[in-house]
Amino acid sequence: MKHSKIDFKDVQGLVRYGYGRLPESCFLLLEIISPRAARDWLKTLDVADAEELSTPPDFALQVAFTHSGLRKIGLSSEIADQFSQEFKTGIYEESRSKRLGDVGENAPREWQWGGDSDNTPHLMLMLYSVKGGLEARKNATVDGLSSAGLALRGCLTSADFGGVEPFGFKDGISQPTVDWDGKRKLDGRDELEYGNLVALGEFLLGHRNEYGKYTDRPLLDLANDPRGILAEAEDKPGKKDFAFNGTYLVFRQLQQHVGRFWKFLDDQVGGDRSERQRLAELMVGRKMGGEALAVKSSSPIPGIDSDKRDANQFTFSSDPDGTRCPFGAHVRRANPRNADLPDGTRGLLSKLIRTLGFGGKGFRGDLISSVRFHRILRRGVEYGEPLPVNDAIKNGGNEIGERGLHFICLNANISRQFEFIQGAWLSSTKFDGMTEESDPIIGNREAVSECPFTNSFSIPQEAGLRRRISGIPAFITVRGGSYFFLPGIRALRYLSSLETD
Amino acid sequence: MTPQSYFMVIAPVDLSRESSLRELLASMNHREGVVNPNNDVIPFGRFERLHFARLVLLKDQTRGDLGVIGAPQAELPVYLAFLCDFDGPLDSFMSELAGQCEAGLRRLFSHCQGFSNGTHLARWMKQHNQRSATAYVNWIGRTMRQVREEDALRQSLESYIDGNQASLSRLAPTEARRELVSFVKREREAGRVVLTEPDATPLSWRVSNAIHLLGVPIVLLLLTPFLLLYLPIFVIQLRRRERSDAEIAPRPDPDHAANLARLEDHFVSNQFSAMGSLKPGLFRRWTLSFILWVIDYTTRYIFNRGHLARVNTIHFARWVFLDNKQRLLFASNYDGGLDSYMDDFINKVGWGLNLVFSNGIGYPKTNWLILDGAKDEQKFKYFIRRHELPTEVWYDAHPGLTTVNLERNTLIREGLERSSMSEGEARDWLRLF
């Protein structure tokens, strides 16, 4: 066996579970006032690990740090500097914002939190509870903060939408399956079929990623771990692995303008209910109940469980013209479900021809990067009050209150995973050979250089000519966000044992 | 067909005047990373044949790597490089440039060693033009005029389709196409759409191309017996080096990375300039020269229609030897952000990168010249970033159009000019919108 089996007791539970059974949740954004007191508090904190329990828990607590938080609690700069550049500079860094589409109304300076270093919390406590249990847990936690040397800077309360996101679509259907047992052969060879089983190292640091390599992370000399708390690095004997079984957590608070969304669609179709829903489904790329628009594949796809086959056993090779699921549909942009070489690669000669860039079908034959290097585990939760479609339209698109998604994703390499998907696929106005449009659901509609507009959406038709929707407003506004690190349990113990001021 | 040409004027900078040169370069930009096309040093926007241009200081930050591997470090100059990619012959473009921007160019080159008031500008530029070992043009023969006309054509057609969506959607593909063809005919007659016939391919270009097209395989054929004899020795030499060559790919300095990031992602396309030293010795020098010679052949005759192997995001690129092949410069104009460009490279043409760049000092360890190397993703990305140079001034004549947009526009035009189409062909053509 190539791998030691994963020690779930060292992994925070969120990596393995979405905590769907704990539908009440809130996220406390905290500032460390007294590092010493905070470390003592951390020692006593009961952080849920990923071990399977015989009886499901009624509460789970997770903790994640920003880079400044790790420094503040006492992690030496020598160790903290070894984190990735994007984690260190933060989500609000200017060049990053351009790539992520965080410009105009979505610019970090407009955010409620996380938009600059002053407004970035040190750490985030994530509380998940069964129905009716959160309030008491939250109050108890908040009451204990000041003696823990912490100050509450924000509280993001989630809401239970029953597995449906605010626009009304079933959410969280497609997730990569984590290769916990190291079944994948990571020998650097091209994968000729799309697979959903993804290397553990894409989601947990200290393990091999899809390249068969170990993503860069903080490693320390044995002397820096005198109590022997941390695990040894798998790839670097003699070094301790601070990030082992930890991962990066991307948090974005996305306000969804539900009224604006349904009103716009209603106007487009002259008030026809089923047409309105059909158009929304084309933009999302799934039916409201979650069914795929593309045709189900006849053969199983590795890493897709049998109970998910109806919703997930498909690729877009059955829909090369985009007539079932438009090229620009949200789910097609977010996961184009391709392999390392263009479709239909068989045998040595065909492989050679395609490796040299020939044999693809049309100008779209080979435009999209292989997806297995760009997957994320999504752990988002809704917030605000649900707004039914009819109410949304009735008020002329105006809505009271704020609702949306606490978008949360986990990945080992923020720039190659989250940022790539967000920048090169979702926000890009040039995705898959298109132009003048970005993601129909989450795009920001900001003009880009020399492109007259970016607010259209093309729907390929059987007859040939596309149907195009124009003048689409922004349906999403970014309200806050930050890059966090979700440490393994041992790393939390290491942090709590530090002795600096 | 009008083939594209290029030049790279390069001269050592008078280092005592480096800061004045940097100021002058900065004055050509609206802001960092965004050129003023009408700047008064070189008003690029005035030159209709010009696709891309850049001014970059070739200040090698990685020369110290020679010391790391224990090789002697000769002092090499810092150069100012001026690169242009344009339509038509070199001589006429350079004269036009020297004629129209004489004052600006003189100001610029006065920061270079050996350039004085009395220097004949055009002649000096020609003398300092450095040939590329390999040059890549995404679509040989697609002129800037064609780019502009075809994009205007597409936009005009798209809005016509938007305005007539209901009626057009009821038509069979060939009928819909006929509608669009007659719309364009009307627009052309009204002078709102212009589609100029391509110029005849220059005879001299065709002749020299034909000689090159046949000449290279003949030379290769003649060399084959010797190459085959040498092959086993080559393999031994290569493997020995691959086992022992040092990797130098630390994380790039954060300030350096931040400087580069500030210049990027202002448009849908980006520039990339990088340089590094070849591994010392004749083995790497000859290997790389041979490889680039072969690649140059393929870019002329095989990869001249939209893609370089599997990479379809590069507009123009070149590999240039410097300092008697001690160093190599790579410059490209590409679509998307650098991280996605590198991902594309690693996953699609890792083998090709290895062929070329593994001859450079510090490159991630390769096996058999094409395996591994770039597949060590993070090391490769660090290596690339570390060798990258800030491109002080960069001009793109079509900053909103990717290579795929250009191809799509060309396909629309070609389909429009076809005399007839089957229903299936017409449907495929209509899908281009």
Image (cartoon, rainbow, N blue to C red):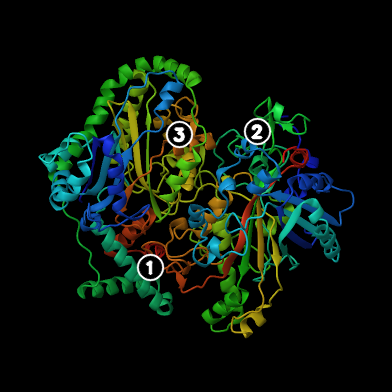
* Residue occupied by mark 2: A219
* Residue occupied by mark 3: B351
Quarter location, residue A382: bottom right
Residue B238 image offset from top left, x and y in percent: 43, 19
Please, which chain is the residue tagged with disc 3 on?
B
Residue B277 image offset from top left, x and y in percent: 37, 28
Tell me which residue sits at (59%, 80%) in the image. Answer: A397
The extreme right residue here reads A55
Query: How many C-alpha atoms fall within 10 Å of the one at disc 2: few (<14), some, or many (≥20)?
Result: many
Q: Earlier in the sequence, mark 2 or mark 1?
A: 2
Relative horizontal placement of residue B316, taking residue A125 as reference (left or right): left
Query: How many C-alpha atoms fall within 10 Å of the one at disc 3: few (<14), some, or many (≥20)?
Result: many
Question: Residue flagged by tag 1: what amino acid is it?
Answer: Pro
* Residue occupied by mark 1: A452
Relative horizontal placement of residue B201, taking residue A488 as reference (left or right): left
Camera sees residue A196: no
Is B51 or B259 nearer to us in this picture? B259
